[in-house]
Image (cartoon, rainbow, N blue to C red):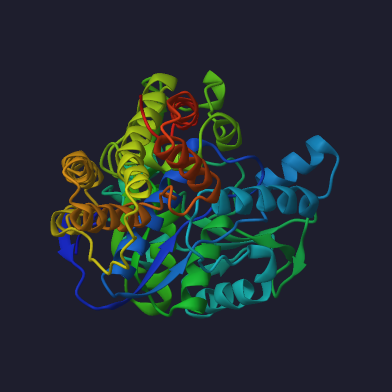
Amino acid sequence: MKIYDSLTNKTFDLINKKLSIYNCGPTVYNDVHIGNIRPLITFDVLVRFLKNQKFDITYIHNITDIDDKIINKAKEEKKTEMEISSFYTNHYLEIVKQLNALPMLMPKVSENINGIIEYINKLVQNNGAYVTNEGNVYFDVNKVSNYGTLSHQNINQLIEGSRKELASDKKFPLDFALWKKTETGLNWKSPWSIGRPGWHTECAYFISKLVGDHVTIHGGGIDLKFPHHENENAQNNAIFHRNIADLWMHVGHINVNNEKMAKSLGNFVLVKDLLIKYTPNDLRWFMYQTKYENPLNYSEDLINQSSNDLLKLFQQLNQGYVQMILNDVAPLNNKNNIDEKFVQSLDDDLNFPEAVAVLWKQAKGLTHLYRSKKWNEFQNEADVIKKELNIFGIVYKSPLEDSNIHSLVIEYKKALNEKNYIVSDKYRQQLIDMKVING
């Protein structure tokens, strides 16, 4: 499989069948929006596809449940930080479940404080970090030679673009906090002060704990490229003298009505609101309409169109399965592999639009097969499509698998056999109204 590496701007082949993937997770201070779940869905398809291709994968997706944003939210709502983080963590995990994401390792910061302190201490001991008189610990950016290479910026550009803090105890403007001295909010004892860890250390620590000195693929949303991923990479270089990842995957922004999502614009689209109107399948299918690294535009018209397209694809499958029941065709126990062209599309840096086009071409060929009563061929092709939908994380249940629909089709068949066409038309209309088949 070829993956585009956003560090080198080159495409590399995944050859080793044993690999590790780290996808940065949410800071749980609010409900997640549609942009938050695009990396989740993208990496889930990557893992599903690689597993289908017999790769052995360790997949990690962290939960940041200690952060200044959580502290501020707790003050605002007059609750404890853990009440806030637990509430939104549970909400996020429910959405992960609804979206049919595969199981993954999901470490929480709150459960790993001692390990993070030990990790920071390693950086202090090898002079990758320094302790200030105030009791803060900062990473010393000048101790690594490749700082800025991931974001493709040099040190001078980064300094010019950084916010210079007044009265800061940092040696250098780009140095970043590993440990913050504070007695505000949740805090812990450390060798340096009472405080809590900085954001950029947690993921670097989780990788060292759960995998080792690096992962095969690291990524998340494009907004994390700098400073978060740059700072993770710097810490890993200071301790292990190598980059934290072989390859970097960064997932593009989602715009809303051709504008960037922003609180100031009031155009955040929350996933919990979308799941009232649309199915998890609809949300996933919408994400596959462009390449993962490109911006994706959201609008109600676009997601409605995507939802309708997926419905049509399901109906192409359903029509044939309904005809199987009506014609007393016994289901086959198929063991088909996914289509080679579908494999080639996803092999090419998860080319979602191309893979979707392959699915459409396959689905359109089903009509001829069931109308010609080529039932074995129909079932073989339908089985391949179902397996491809599964790689996309799309849940499809055929009329053979859905007991309610199956019972309705049996009643429809019975009325047809009895030539009771008034009743059979009623059942057919029910199938149309339920959107099982089209008119």
Residue 7: percent from left, percent from top: 25, 56
User: Above or below — where is 81 with respect to 19?
Assistant: above
The image position of residue 386, as x and y in percent, is 33, 54
- Residue 162 visible here: no
- Left or right, 371 with respect to 130, comes to left
Q: Residue at x 44, y 37 (%)?
A: 418
Percent across and percent down for residue 150 are: 30, 55
In the rendered view of the protein, which quadrant contains the C terminus?
top left
Residue pushed farthest front?
418
| 54 vs 376, nearest the viewer | 376
Q: Quadrant of residue 300?
A: top left
Whether 339 is drawn above or below 425: the answer is: below
Residue lying at 30% horizontally and 64% vertically, measured from the top left: 332
Front one among 153 and 257: 257
Q: Quadrant of the N terminus?
A: bottom left
In this rendering, position of residue 332 left or right of residue 27: left
Residue at 50% across, 66% down: 104
* Image side of residue 148 versus residue 210, left or right: left
Vertical comparison of 199 with 355: above or below? below
Tell me where residue 385 appears, x and y as whole percent.
27, 52
Residue 194 seen by the camera? yes
